[in-house]
Structures are given as structure tokens and as C-alpha cells.
Amino acid sequence: MRHVAEHVGMSMMTVSRVLNNESSVKPATREKVMNAVQELGYRPNISARNLAAAQSYFLGLIYDNPSAAYMSELLLGALERCNQKGYHLVVQSCGPEAATWADELTKRLTGSHLDGVIVPPPVCDDPKVLEALRRFDMPYVCISPNSQLPDTPVVYMDDRQAAYQMTQHLLEQGHRDIGFILGHPNQESSRLRYQGFSQALGDAGIRIDELRVVQGFYSYKSGFAAAERLLSDTHRPTAIFASNDDMAAAVYANAQRYNLRIPDDLSVVGFDDTPTASIIYPALTTIRQPIAEMAGAALDMLSELIKKKKDPDFEPELRHKLDFELIQRDSVARK
Amino acid sequence: MRHVAEHVGMSMMTVSRVLNNESSVKPATREKVMNAVQELGYRPNISARNLAAAQSYFLGLIYDNPSAAYMSELLLGALERCNQKGYHLVVQSCGPEAATWADELTKRLTGSHLDGVIVPPPVCDDPKVLEALRRFDMPYVCISPNSQLPDTPVVYMDDRQAAYQMTQHLLEQGHRDIGFILGHPNQESSRLRYQGFSQALGDAGIRIDELRVVQGFYSYKSGFAAAERLLSDTHRPTAIFASNDDMAAAVYANAQRYNLRIPDDLSVVGFDDTPTASIIYPALTTIRQPIAEMAGAALDMLSELIKKKKDPDFEPELRHKLDFELIQRDSVARK
DNA sequence: TTGTAAGCGTTATCAA
DNA sequence: TTGATAACGCTTACAA
């Protein structure tokens, strides 16, 4: 940095200010400095900056036992935005025991020099975790939490609306007798997806047959069992709406045992648009969750919150809703 | 750190030495310091350490357009080991144009304060990239590169041996007429897997039918086309060995169009053990690549290389072979 | 709008 | 085996 300063005949402070985009620099000076930086190929030393500014530019991502596909997309999305914004991501895995999430976190947070953390499900649904975070005065953003507390920054998607739209799609294709496989009872998304489904049916004036709604747990295995209940019935539904892609894949598997061809004998739709959806045959019609975008939005929000910590007048948005997309592939036939 | 030093009545230097595991500390002193560290809940400031030690504890992971599943496992594996060793991972995405990988890299490396980089495929197969790395005197480790140059540190798996063993498994189940779908012609793994296959056949005294060996490109789509060529034959093979799981999934899809039941009418095996392998029905017999372990091993090797940079007498291993695993599931039947 | 001086928390160096 | 002191490269706080 000294080189640059000498090169333009100014003090290091001016260079520093230019590099940090501070407003109190004359444009001409700024440009001169920028040129010198380019010319000399100068890059600031991150450690020195962090040390002096008492900021680490480290962001935490707390996770536990997630679906690998979900985690991977989240990670990639977060990583990319981090690179853009000059942050670094520290991925922290909590233990699998729900009771200790908060303790684990406390341990890791103590003396870690994180500027903020991103909290995806299911960790964000532990009130103790959020409480610990607040105790540390650590900025955080939750992703798709079960409940949206008023003072908690969140990034989310409208699961209810997505399920509603998917059900409408089935209805438009002439299906009237639709089976539904629920997600995990502890997760709000399950409830929302079911709500969207039943509301669409209600709005179309179709009475919901409770025998057609079976419990699943978002796992392949649970989906297989649920499909069994739906398909073993002599009077089968013409379409099945599985609350996620893994369970939809399980419906495919079980349908084969009954010699049912998809979509001719049975239409199937899923939710999430994981890689699974394109690799099973026929390719699955599903809802695309913008997971990577969520991570990006969460990072944006987090950096605002960090800014707010220094300048409390600043009032960042606390909730950000992202759009889903209904992806039509080959698993739905006209009835 | 001062607190700790005062607490044990010693200088900060001693504390520093204990924390860095230096040998020249009396065990009694070490223990006392450690206790104080525990008691006071002291955590070193990473930025300050990096600044003083002129090490960043940042490691780069250079990637481009990888299979999401592969990347995700690699990432998670690398991340975990990084956490253990006190490193941080900076994930760098190169552009998709092969011509510019090295340039991209040069740009990112200039002034970035990375201590070393991990180079997974396909980036590690660009000689210019390796050359650039050497020019920067930047320690690096390649993962599963196409060619193993003598002075290049690598972590790899024995693809040939794995394919050999898989073919033996098929042979043991009584299959004699086995179709093979090749991987991408530019990737050495394709060649090795095919070598293993043909060698196993040769060792069993079976002549290889060249019509049974069809080109694929590791993609679902290419696998589908390849399967078509194999299955449209009136005299069909009794088993198909696809060079990866995605292509095996495509064989499943195509088999359905011919009303072939797996494994009764057709046995199928894959390679990689991606999540796909467990989500398709019936679950796929395949080879598990220890991707996360490779990342871990690469990190170990990298930290040795970084050590060597300071202490050139030190001679770390330059190649590390990891074990694969043959995972038997439900896609192979006795013939 | 720019500059000066002090210090951020650690480790390297040299001396004891 | 331990300690004193000077960096490390940058930013904050204040002064000009």
C-alpha cells in the first residue's frame, strides 16, 4: 500500500479510503489511486484489514444433517455471493442432537470472529439457537424457518402458493382424484404444501377425500410406504402429489411393482426440483425451489445487518420472499 | 492473549508457543497455559495470527462446471478437514472456457493470499493451470487427474481395479454377454474403467464383442442413446456396465421402453455411487468413489507441502491412493 | 478533502 | 526454555 501511496504522492490513508469506497475522496484523486493500484497490481492484505477494522469478513453457515442436494445448492449459492461481496464462508456443522445445537453453537461462537451467520433449516427452528445468537449480538438470517417471528430476519419461499399452483395444474389436466403424500409433520413446509393443495381443491369445488391423504416424512422410504397405501387401493387415484421429489421417486418405484406406467396410468408430481427430478424416468414435473438464490438473498440481508450494527440508523428489510417456478416435464398426462 | 499470559505469570510469547505446538516448551508450562486458555475461554485472533505469521490459512478450491453431486461431496469433505486443521476454504469458480482457466487463475492468484490450492478435475487436466501454479510457487494438490506427472502431488483412486472387480462380480453372477457404455473420451477415467472391464473379461477367457462397447459421455442423455444401441439389438446383452451412475439411470429409463425388468431381464451396474444410485428403482449396484475422503487426503497433503515450503528438508508423500468399495444393491440378478 | 499517529493481536528475531 | 521488542499491513480517531 505504501508503494501505491508513494506512486501517487499521497498518504496511505487516502489510498485506504479509496479502497473502501469512502465518500470523502475527490473523484480525481480516486481515479489516480485506482490507476496506480491497477498498475502496481496491488492487492490489500485481508488479514491486516480484518485486524485493524475488527471485522473478520467471515460468515458462518450452520448446518446439520441436511439433504445433501439441498445443502450443496445452498452452499454453492452462498459461496458465489460471498466471493462477490468479499466475504468468506465458514461452514460449521452442528452435532446431530437437537438438544445440543445451541450449546455447540455457543462453543463455536465463543471467540470465533464471525461477522454473522446464516441459519438454514432445521437448525433455524430451534428457539435456543436463535436465543444464543441474540445473546452474542451476532447478526443472523434464517432460511425457510418453520415460524416467522416478527423480529427475525428471514428469506423464504411461498410453499403454499406453489402447492396451490401445482394442484391447479393437475386439475387443468383433468385430474379429479388426486392422492397427496404429506411431508414431515414437524416441518412447517409440510403444512403449507398441504394447505395449498387442499385450498386449490376447495376452490375448484372438489371435496377432499381424507383417505387420499397419507403421511410421509420427506424420505424415499416413507414415500414408498405412502405410495403403497395409495396404490394398493382397488380404486386408485389418477394422480399423486408427493410433497417432495424423493417421495415422488418412491412413487415411481412402487408404481412399477403394480405395472403402472407413468404418466399414462398414473400422473405424479413432486416438489423441490432436486437432481432426482431429471434423472428418474419419465422426468418429473415439480416445483423449483430457488435454493441458491435464497442463499444469495440471505447473504445480502446479512451484510445489511452487519452494516446496521455500525450505523444503527440504517433500517434493512427483515423478510425477503423469493419466487418459485412450476417446471413441467413428462410425468403428468391429460386425464 | 495477554490475560492468559498474566494469569499464568508468563510472557505472551510462551503462550503463543504453546498454542502453536512448538517443541521448545516445558511440558509443565504447556499444561499450565492450556488450563488457563480453557479457563478463560481464550481464542486466538485469526487475522492477527495471519498477519504476523505471513500465512493466511486460506486454501483455494478451484472448480469449474462440475457435477453438482461430485462437487458437493468434495466440498463437504474439504470443508470438514479444513475446520479440523484450522484452515479456511475459498472456493474459486473458474469460467467455463478451457482456454482461460489459467488466465482466470492467474488473475485470482495475484495478490490473493492463499497458502495453497486444491485442483479437482477437470481443471487439473489443463497443463497451463499447473504451470501457472508453479510459476506462483503456490503449493497445490490434484485430485484424480488424467495423467500423473512425476512431480505433481495427486490424490486418486484405482478406477481400473474397481472396474475389474465390478466386472468380476458380473461374471460370478453368470453373465457372459455384457454391454459396456464408455465414459467421456477426453477423461482418463473412461479409459481406465474400460481397461478394467476388458481385462477382467480377458482373464476369464471371454472374448470381447466390440459391438457391445458403445460410446457415452458420462451424461444422462448420452447414456440413453448408448442404451438404445445396446437394447435395440435383437440379441440383447444380459447385463450392462455403465461407466457412471447417470448413464446407468438412463439405461433404466430406456429399459422401461422395452418392457425389460431390472434385474430379471437385464442386470445393470454403474460407477460413482452418487445419490442417484439409491433413488432409482431398483437400487443400483455400483462402485463407491471416496470423494470426501479424497478431499480430506488432498488437504492433508497440501498442508504438508505448505510445511515443506518453510522447511525444505521435509519430504512429504506426493501421491495417495484411496480405496474404492463395491456396493451391491438390487440391480444384478443371477444368470 | 487529506494527513498524522496510534494501535489492532499475533509471531519472528534475538538475547538472556 | 523463556522473554523483550519490533514488526506484520491496515484502519480508526483526530488534526489540519
Image: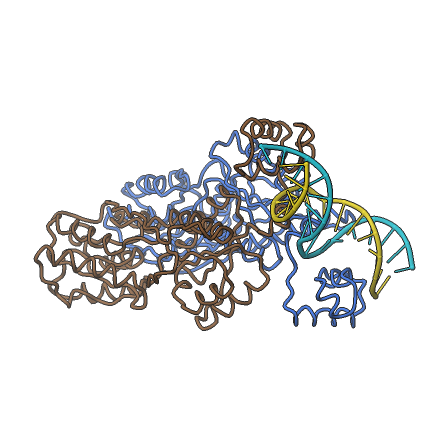
Chain colours: A blue, B brown, C yellow, D cyan
Q: Where residue A268 appears, x then y in whole percent?
A: 36, 52
Q: Position of residue A39 (x, y in %)?
A: 66, 72
Q: Is residue B199 visible?
A: yes
On the question of residue A115 being in view, the answer is: no
Left or right: B14, with C3 as reference point: left
Residue toward you, B151 or A18: B151
Q: Look at the image and tell me in which quarter the N terminus of chain B lies.
A: top right
* Left or right: A265, with B25 as reference point: left
> Can you give x and y, in whole percent of width and height, for residue A322 in the image?
57, 54
Q: Is residue A85 left or right of residue B225?
A: right
Residue A188 placement (x, y as % from top left): 52, 40
Residue, x 43% and y 45% (percent of image)?
A: A67
The quadrant in which residue A134 appears is top right
Q: Nearer the viewer, residue A324 or B263?
A: B263
Viewer-side residue, A120 vs A276: A120
Using residue A129 as the reference point, say whether residue B298 is left or right of it. left
Res B216 quadrant in image: bottom left
Q: Is residue B209 above or below residue B85?
A: below
Furthest toward the left, the residue is B205
Tag count in the figure?
0
Please state which of residues A216 and B71 is positioned toward the viewer in this rendering: B71
